[in-house]
Structures are given as C-alpha cells and as structure tokens.
Amino acid sequence: MRTSLLRLGYTEAAKPEQADIFLINSCSFIREAQEETIQTVFDTLKIRDKKSPDMKVGLVGCFVERFSAAVKQDIPELDFTIGTQRYHEVGTLISEKFGIELSAHAAELAEDVVRCNADSARPFVWLRIAQGCDRKCAFCIIPTIRGGLKTYTMEDIDRQLADEASLRNHTVPMREVVLVSQDTISQGVEEIERIVAHLSEKEEIRWIRLQYLFPDRRVLELLKLWQKYPKLVPYLDIPFQHVSPEILKAMKRPSDTALFGEIMDLARKISPDFEIRTSFIVGFPGETEAHYNDLVSFVKTHRIDKLALFRYSHEVGTSAGDQLAETVGDEEKYRRINELRDIHLETRKQYALGLMGRTETMIVDEVNAGEVTLRRAHDAPESDEIVTAPLPGGLKLQPGDMPQVTIKAYTEYSFLGEIKRPADV
C-alpha cells in the first residue's frame, strides 16, 4: 500500500492530523482485533473532526472483507473502503475516487521510493506461495475472509522476488526467504520442493524457511527435503492447536496426536538442532481441566522450542461460534494460558542454557549505535528470539552479513552473544 502511494507522488505525513488521506489497515480474525479496528476508526474520525475536516479516512483489509455491509451501514463517516485483494492498487484506487491528478515525475518518484525502502530494508523477505484455505477448522474464519486455496505460480513467486529486489536496489541482500501461506502443506510436497529447489539456485539466498504447516502426514514426507536442500533452516512451524483427541475432533482438526510426536521425532532425527514452533488454543468449548492437563503433560514431555498460546475467541461465522456454547470463562482461559506459559518457559530455559558457549553462523538484521541485532537459523524474523551483541571496535557489519557468533547468555526471550573475529560476512 505504502509503495503504491509513494510511486504515484503521495508523501507520508509526519503526524496524523497533517494527513490528507488516512488509511487504517484492519484485522477481523478474533474479537479483540475487531474491537481494536473499530476503536481505531472512531479515534481517527475524532482527529478528522477536530483538526482536519478535509481529511479522507479509509478502512482497508479483512475487516472490510468480512463485514462490508455492516461497515457501510454503521460507519457512513468513512470515505472509502478497500478489501484484502487490492493492497497493491490502493494508490490508483484513491486517485480515481477523489479525482487526484497523478504526478508527472513518476521516474524521479520511483527512485525516491527505492531509496526510502532501501533505507528500511531487512535481509529477509516473506514470499507468498498461496492464498486462502480449503480446511474447515471450527474456530477459524480465514476461509470466509480469504476464500479457498489458490496456489501461486513460479512466475508469481519470481515477480515478488523481482519487486523486492527493485525496491532495495541491492543495498541490503535477500539472505533469507520465508515461504508463507494460510496452509503451506496443502500445496503438496512436490510443489514445495519445486519452489525450494528454484530458490536454492539463487546465490544471494542463504536461508529458506517454511511457515504455517498444517500437521498432516505429508509433513513426514516433506521433512526429507531438509536432507536434500542445505539452505532449508532447521526450523519447523507447525500449529498443533491442541493435543486432546476429543477437543481436536471438536475443532475439526486431525486427532491423531501420535503424529505430532512422529513429526517432532523425525525432525530431530534429521538434525538434533531442529527447533519446533507450534501454537495451542486454550478454552475451546468443551475443554475440561482434564483436556487442559493433556496440554500440560505434552509441554512437559516434549521439547517445544517456541510456543504461541491463544485464548479461544467465539467468532460468528465459524462453526464453533455458530453451533457451540462457550464453556470456559475468560478468567479461566487466562489462568490456563499463564500456567502453560510458565511451564514452557522453564522447559525452554533448560534447553537454552545448554546452548551457552556454542558458536553459530547468524544473520545481521540491524546495526544500531554499536549494538548488533542478529538471529539464529532457528528463529523466524519478527516472531522468535533474537541475539544482541556489541559491535567489536573496528569491525563493520551491515544487515545481511552472516558472522560467527558465540552465545553467551539467555534472557527468557532472547540471547546475548559475542561476534567472533574475523567475521564471515
């Protein structure tokens, strides 16, 4: 969205009240996100009414996609709305709607956009390899918002890479590619291998990461790719959502929980270093203390390296929200989440302390005031742990460099490290 506007000659306002056009990027996945979206809309409308009456306010994203009719009826003060499939057209759509004449200096502006994006570029990029989902998980609204699964062609993927490269102007290399979709495994192992093989041939790319793998038996076959393609990082992002067969059936998820252990065991057979990221939903309708204790037992007996915990949100439009009654109150959901979090952190701590003194190749994400922010191959950008280290005097590092770093300390959600000399950049 930002790029589509900058390329047409729009400039960014320093303060909200200085904007001629105010875009709110929305979310509607769970109730808190919906409430935050609505509150942001009304906060913005207050700014317009008090300080900038000519400001145009638009709501963009999946809240619009999901509640289009209600938005138009209940918030007529909005000047425009744009759904999830047209982010890249936002600049043109706004110009056409309000009769804004496009700048005659497009070439110069394109250079400004490249310079602006290069200044904030990081050495990783998310590549979307599909959109939508055909599954019918009882708690999930994504198929309603995003539609059914639509896979991207290799041409689509290369186009994303080319766009990203043009915006960075080669100032920050694309060292890491993160493959994402709502349901990555549903594209099939052969198609995923085709993409991984294609990306592995690109010299600039050093790490390839897969995220959002649904736990079905194809993951066992997929894991064989890690033995063929060394650029695949030893990291598996696979949301289990629960471990009680009864609750999983109610969630309309696979209930063969023995498969979860098989996947984790095979991953660590391939590499003892393999780190697993998963997520659990706590407080689903019908979850008893016994079901919750199944989660506790699983976390205590399996090495889960990264764990996201979510409070079940009762959503209209999902089969759980429309057909099941809530049986666990919010206070109890939070108690269970906090307890499970503490158990996981204690088990994670024991593993993390075992990494002390280990030297690994890491990727530099940022360099600020003598301090370097890095990541291990086992950590996804903007969601997992980071490593901070002082920048040794006389050593120059920039985002995308990949020095050797020794892990010195663990601080619950991050590590402290020491950059070795000479650094391999």
Image (spheres, rainbow, N blue to C red):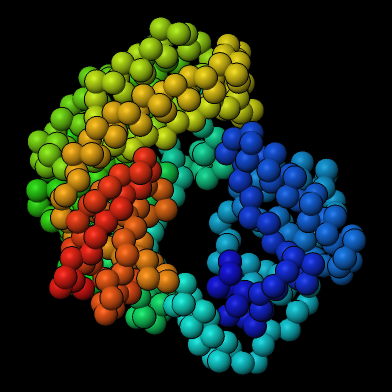
Judge whether 110 appears above or below 151 on screen. below
Instruction: Left or right? Give the position of 294 relative to 271.
Output: right
Image point (35%, 47%), residue name: 414
| Residue 315 percent across, percent down from the top left | 61, 28
Please tell me whether residue 95 is drawn above or below residue 377 in the rendered image: below
The answer to whether residue 312 is left or right of residue 382 is: right
> Which quarter of the rendering shows the C terminus?
bottom left
Place of residue 69 in the rendered image (x, y in percent of width and height, measured from the top left): 75, 43
Q: Position of residue 51 (x, y in %)?
A: 87, 65
Give the left or right position of residue 164, taking residue 36 as reference.
left
Q: Position of residue 422 (x, y in %)?
A: 15, 73
Query: 27 or 275, which is in the foreground?
Result: 275
Q: Is residue 107 visible?
A: yes
Vertical placement of residue 178 versus 240, above or below: below
Which of the image's four quarters has the N terminus?
bottom right
How many marks can you see? 0
Which residue is drawn at the image coordinates 67% and 79% (left, top)? Answer: 10
Left or right of 17, for residue 418 = left
Front-most of residues 424 and 117: 424
Outermost residue, front direction? 393
Identify the residue shown where x is 48% and y is 25%: 338
For the point 54% across and 23% down, the residue is: 334
